[in-house]
Image: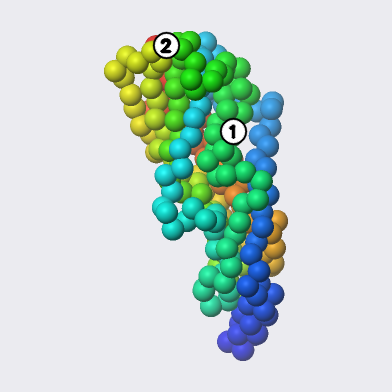
């Protein structure tokens, strides 16, 4: 059994080599899927985002690891920054639920949402005869009134994904990040504290 595991680890390590995983993440929600945000159709909102990830993680969105758990290459996002992907995913969720969007600089009375991105990460772990993919997306969501009313609230939202595979090519990292984003958006739209903050004026 140990010999078979060693062979598997060696083969997967050779397969990964030192090549970076260049991923193109494209979260596409179901436009017909509604969430509890639908009851807030009277709202007008703006959505902004800030990249507050650890400095050591800003040059990549994950690590490609060999069979011994050692990082051998970065996972690089090629199409958009994580900050923009989170911002656009939130905008799509509001739009899908009939909520009007305005620019973050607008003076129109609205709720200003700022997603302060803390984590956007994916990596793999070699097991005996398969590979487990892990992904986490986490942000602090700041809710403010425009014009300012003195009321603000912050809510930590996290989405995670875990998936077992026989191989871990670029598509595995992409799909796991998309799954984590889907859970992140689901958690966002169903968080009781966040919904309560959004219900207040304006």
Q: Is residue 184 left or right of residue 196?
A: right
145 versus 129 height, above or below: above
Q: Is residue 50 left or right of residue 64?
A: left
Quadrant the N terminus occupies: bottom right
Distance from disc 1 to disc 2, alpha carbons, whole Å, reads 23 Å
Residue occupying image coordinates x 48% and y 20%? 105
Residue named by callout 1? 88
> Is 199 in front, or is 152?
152
Marker disc for residue 202: 2
Q: Earlier in the sequence, mark 1 or mark 2?
A: 1
Residue occupying image coordinates x 44% and y 30%? 114
Q: Could you say where residue 146 lies in the image, as x and y percent from the top left?
A: 41, 15
Q: Is residue 13 left or right of residue 59?
A: right
Identify the residue at the far left of this view.
Answer: 150
187 versus 124 height, above or below: above
Marker disc for residue 102: none
Secondary structure at badge 1 equals: helix
Secondary structure at badge 2 equals: loop
Q: Could you say where residue 47 lies in the image, as x and y percent from the top left?
A: 51, 27
> Is 56 in front, or is 14?
56
């Amino acid at each position: 059994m140990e010999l078979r595991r060693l062979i598997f680890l060696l083969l997967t390590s050779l397969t990964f080599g030192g090549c970076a995983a260049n991923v193109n993440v494209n979260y596409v929600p179901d436009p017909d899927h509604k969430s509890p945000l639908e009851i807030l159709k009277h709202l007008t909102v703006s959505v902004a985002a800030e990249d507050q990830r650890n400095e050591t993680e800003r040059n990549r969105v994950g690590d490609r690891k060999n069979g011994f758990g050692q990082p051998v290459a970065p996972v690089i996002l090629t199409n958009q920054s994580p900050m923009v992907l989170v911002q656009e995913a939130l905008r799509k969720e509001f739009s899908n639920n009939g909520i009007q969007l305005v620019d973050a600089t607008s003076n129109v009375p609205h709720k200003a949402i700022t997603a302060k991105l803390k984590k956007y990460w994916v990596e793999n772990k070699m097991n005996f005869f398969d590979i487990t993919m892990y992904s986490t997306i986490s942000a602090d969501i700041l809710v403010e009134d425009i014009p300012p009313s003195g009321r603000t609230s912050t809510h930590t939202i996290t989405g995670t994904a875990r998936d077992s595979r026989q191989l871990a090519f670029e598509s595995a990292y992409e799909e796991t990040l998309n799954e984590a984003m889907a859970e992140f958006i689901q958690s966002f739209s169903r968080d009781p504290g966040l919904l309560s903050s959004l219900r207040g004026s304006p």
